[in-house]
Image (spheres, helix red, strand yellow):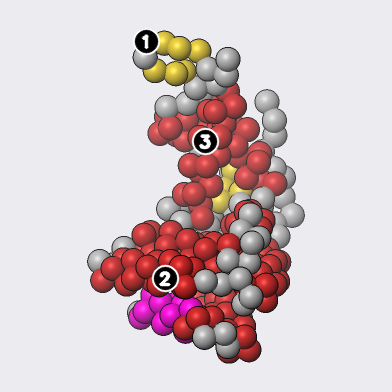
Amino acid sequence: MSTAIYGSFPVPTRRNARSLALDTIRQKIITLELAPGAQLSENVLAGQLGLSRTPIRESLILLAEERLVFVVPQVGTVVAPILLSEVETAQFVREALELAALKESFTRVTPKDIAELNTIIDAQRIAESRGSLPNFFALDEEFHSALMGISGHGSAWRSVSQAKAHLDRARHLSLSFDHRIGLLISQHQQIVDSLAIGEEDATETALRAHLRKIYEDIATIRAESPLLFGETPEVDSPSPL
């Protein structure tokens, strides 16, 4: 069995503890709860998560492989800046896969698919009215996953998700701009409306422009907060136990 039973509650295995630590710390970095440059203490993280230091250290090693953290000599493990090279690679992967999937969607899309996308957009409007950035971000992910799913290659969204940690950090920053969520919702609606009437060129143009909007946002954010961004640090990863 993968877990021991203590009373009525399963005791996490080492693997489950590492997964919990990895997912939690990664999410805090992506949402900028742990900002670029933040120093990470294994003891503090272990205390916050109710885990030993071992799964924390293992998670930091995995996060270093994603270039989300790195080691500064005499300082310790810190959160990496948003790496522009990683953003560009993620954007390339995302754009290539989403546009390729869209090309195959025109002959497969159904009224039910359009209704599902419009339902997600309606939920996004509710999130906007409530000022809920986390809910909107989750619904934005749901929209793009559903859009890709129409092609019959919905599982490819996992490849997109795994590649875009640094891109997602920039996206979280951009959501704080005035009227940004409203603009994204408008772009989503334009994509769906064009798809619904089979306007292939218009749909592809709308999706491409939507995906590339992040570059304008990054330029604005860099001008105001340049220290949030950087290139790949030539530093060490946390050492294994």
Residue 213 visible? The answer is no
Q: Foreground: 94 or 213?
A: 94
**Dominant secondary-structure state across the stretch colored magenta:** helix
User: Could you tell me which residue is drawn at 66 percent across and 39 percent down?
Assistant: 61
User: Could you tell me which residue is drawn at 41 percent across and 77 percent down?
Assistant: 185
Per the rendering, the mark at residue 115 is 2
Q: Amino acid at mark 3?
A: Ala
Q: Foreground: 220 or 128?
A: 128
Say if 223 sits above or below 65 in the image.
below
Q: Position of residue 18 (x, y in %)?
A: 57, 31
Range of magenta residues: 179-192
Of badges 1 and 3, nearer the viewer stands 1
- Secondary structure at numbered mark 2: helix
Q: Which residue is mark 1?
A: 7
Q: Earlier in the sequence, mark 1 or mark 3?
A: 1
Q: Position of residue 2 (x, y in %)?
A: 57, 19
Distance from Cα at disc 1 to Cα at disc 2: 46 Å
Whether residue 195 sits left or right of residue 151 in the image: it is left
Q: Position of residue 218 (x, y in %)?
A: 55, 76
Per the rendering, the mark at residue 21 is 3
Q: Earlier in the sequence, mark 2 or mark 3?
A: 3
Whether residue 25 sits left or right of residue 164 in the image: it is left
Say if 186 sits above or below 43 in the image.
below
Distance from Cα at disc 2 to Cα at disc 3: 37 Å
User: Could you tell me which residue is drawn at 38 percent across and 59 percent down?
Assistant: 134
Of badges 2 and 3, nearer the viewer stands 2
- Secondary structure at numbered mark 3: helix
